[in-house]
């Protein structure tokens, strides 16, 4: 049993089109810095978890593959999948393993090599993350289309515009340009978004996160180990909530909110001792799941950064830039940093570590006064949501 | 592609090509897998019989009256599988919609298609292709569910303005 669980080391690969490496090499690219920041070696790991959605890439036995490549055999392992929230699911496995006392040090690795398959195949495979039989087989829903159904509902209900959605992309590219690990390191303007071709109305190409190769790694340790190893630089997992949504979108109550996200947020806030009525008072910043632009705005509301129907005003008033009410996705988000499905949740943990310990690159370091960072990671279209709160001080 | 790779093997001895953008060496997988599933509809056969007659059927728990669409054969509220098939009102209101421009390759034979979600007057919601002008569609407008014939030759349901 460990009362508290810390993140003691992190690593992040360059996200993007990574034709220069195979899967194991891509994994090592984030594992090595994670070992180095934790000052540990593979032999110190008790258990490891790999989040990887797979299908588009050749190797399925990724834990075994990296056990071999990185000298982790014969330690226990597991591959987990929760669509785009796989990375947070892996963190949950690691967290519960340490918390329960089953392991003292757990390595959590998220990896995805999506570009081993041609783009059309990837588009087809991601579209199958909902209800395959009732919504894909006959109606050919794609991942953007699932979220577009929400984007449309939100615009119609609250009067947000496609330009408001574009503003999210502009912000995330602004910060992506300052993140050397991001897939897109260039700024864009609203016009770039508005002039790009439609993918699934109201979303255009620049409303969408890209198809990405990448890996991210976090090493978790028990409170006792942190003491024993004398680790100064670490952050604590203060709380995590997880929710599940229905497979069919037609079984959902609302299309302007993700029920799994509001559920997960409430759990996480409660666990971390954060006032649900005013969570931004407790947070220095957040990473939210901006697989498309509109879901970032919906996330503001599901996470209670503002009232229902006012999320688009937050971005319109630039309140989610550094210096605003709460900085969001200042690593570029999924939109500009890239979205390697299995790695995204772990990448958010890496960002929480960097932000809280003030190690972010110039121009994208938030002011750290409250010592807490939030990560919101959605699988499918609210089919799963994980909300994790990280902090400098343990509870 | 296949022919190209054959040529590359003949010339270089391996199925290794240079990535167009980065120039990095890539092994081109020689093994190809085509996926197509066989999915049981044994317990929802009446749904298809109804559709053939132009009716939209759902299931209803005989014990508690809960309505299910898509139909399911078990009621988790009652732990009961005593269900009946009922015809759903084929009218309702539009909830939301999109137009899918970039289609999955397996839908390549179709033009960009509008998709809508409607709430039927009976309560259940339904997602289907929308037959009508998406630019005229507004949440709350009256719609109906009707049967249509697919390019593949089978019948399916679609949403259209009422
Ligand atoms: Zn019942």
Image (cartoon, rainbow, N blue to C red):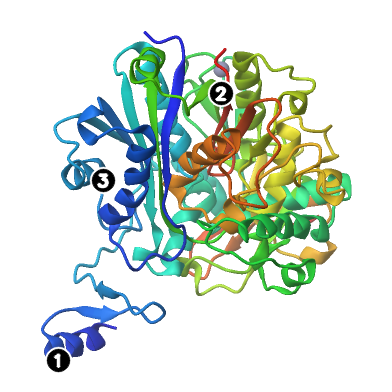
Residue carrying label 2: A241
The reply to whether residue A158 is in sight is yes
Residue carrying label 1: B11
| Rendering coords of residue A216 (x, y %) | 42, 45
Quarter assignment of residue B19: bottom left
Within 10 angstroms of label 1, few (less than 14), some, or many (20 or more) residues?
few
The residue closer to the viewer here, A357 or A198, is: A357
The subunit carrying tag 2 is A
| Rendering coords of residue A39 (x, y %) | 33, 33
Q: Which mark is residue A62?
A: 3
Element type at mark 3: helix
| Rendering coords of residue A185 (x, y %) | 59, 64
The subunit carrying tag 1 is B
- In the picture, measured across the screen, residue A164 lies left or right of residue A12, that is right
Against A374, residue A142 (above or below) is below
Callout count: 3
State the residue at coordinates (79%, 23%): A278
Element type at mark 1: helix
- In the picture, measured across the screen, residue B2 lies left or right of residue B88, that is left
Task: Look at the image and tell me in which quarter the C terminus of chain B lies.
Answer: bottom right
Against A306, residue A184 (above or below) is below
């Amino acid at each position: 049993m460990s009362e508290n669980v810390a993140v003691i080391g992190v690593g992040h690969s360059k996200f993007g089109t990574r034709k220069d490496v195979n899967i194991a090499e891509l994994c090592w690219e984030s594992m090595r810095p994670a070992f180095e920041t934790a000052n540990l070696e593979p032999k110190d790991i008790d258990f490891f978890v790999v989040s990887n959605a797979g299908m588009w890439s050749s190797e399925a036995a990724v834990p075994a593959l990296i056990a071999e490549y990185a000298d982790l055999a014969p330690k226990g392992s597991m591959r987990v999948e929760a669509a785009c929230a796989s990375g947070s699911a892996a963190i949950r496995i690691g967290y519960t393993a340490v918390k329960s006392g089953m392991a003292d040090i757990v390595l959590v690795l998220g990896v995805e090599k999506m570009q081993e398959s041609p783009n059309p195949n990837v588009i087809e495979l991601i579209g199958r993350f909902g209800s395959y039989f009732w919504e894909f087989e006959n109606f050919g829903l794609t991942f953007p289309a699932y979220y577009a159904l929400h984007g449309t509902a939100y615009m119609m209900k609250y009067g947000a515009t496609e330009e408001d959605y574009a503003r999210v992309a502009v912000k995330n590219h602004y910060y992506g340009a300052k993140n050397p690990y991001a897939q897109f390191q260039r700024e864009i303007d609203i016009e770039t978004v508005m002039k790009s071709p439609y993918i699934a109305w109201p979303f255009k190409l620049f409303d969408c996160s890209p198809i990405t190769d990448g890996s991210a790694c976090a090493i978790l340790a028990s409170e006792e180990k942190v003491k024993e190893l004398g680790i100064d630089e670490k952050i604590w997992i203060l709380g995590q909530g997880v929710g599940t949504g229905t497979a069919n979108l037609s079984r959902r109550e609302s299309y302007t909110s993700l029920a799994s996200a509001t559920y997960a947020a409430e759990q996480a806030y409660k666990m971390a001792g954060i006032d649900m009525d005013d969570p931004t008072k407790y947070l220095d910043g957040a990473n939210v799941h901006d697989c498309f632009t509109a879901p970032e705005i919906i996330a503001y509301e599901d996470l209670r950064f503002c009232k229902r129907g006012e999320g688009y005003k937050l971005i319109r008033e630039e309140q989610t830039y550094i210096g605003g009410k709460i900085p969001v996705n200042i690593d570029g988000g999924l939109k500009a940093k890239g979205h390697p499905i299995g790695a995204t949740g772990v990448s958010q943990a890496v960002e929480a570590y960097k932000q809280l310990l003030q190690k972010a690159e110039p121009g994208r370091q938030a002011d750290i006064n409250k010592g807490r960072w939030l990560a919101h990671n959605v699988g499918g279209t609210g089919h799963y949501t994980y909300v994790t709160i990280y902090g400098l001080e343990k509870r | 592609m296949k022919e190209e790779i054959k040529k590359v093997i003949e010339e270089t001895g391996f199925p290794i090509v240079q990535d167009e953008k980065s120039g990095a060496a890539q092994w081109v997988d020689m093994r190809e897998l085509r996926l197509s599933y066989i999915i049981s509809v044994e317990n929802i056969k009446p749904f298809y019989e109804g559709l053939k007659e132009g009716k939209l059927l759902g299931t209803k728990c005989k014990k508690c009256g809960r309505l299910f669409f898509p139909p399911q054969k078990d009621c988790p509220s009652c732990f009961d599988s005593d269900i009946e098939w009922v015809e759903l009102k084929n009218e309702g209101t539009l909830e939301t919609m999109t137009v899918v421009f970039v289609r999955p390759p397996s839908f390549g034979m179709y033009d960009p298609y509008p998709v809508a979600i409607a709430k039927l007057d009976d309560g259940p919601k339904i997602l289907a292709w929308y037959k009508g002008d998406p630019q005229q569609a507004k949440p709350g407008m009256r719609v109906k569910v009707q049967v249509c014939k697919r390019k593949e030759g089978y019948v399916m349901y679609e949403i259209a303005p009422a």
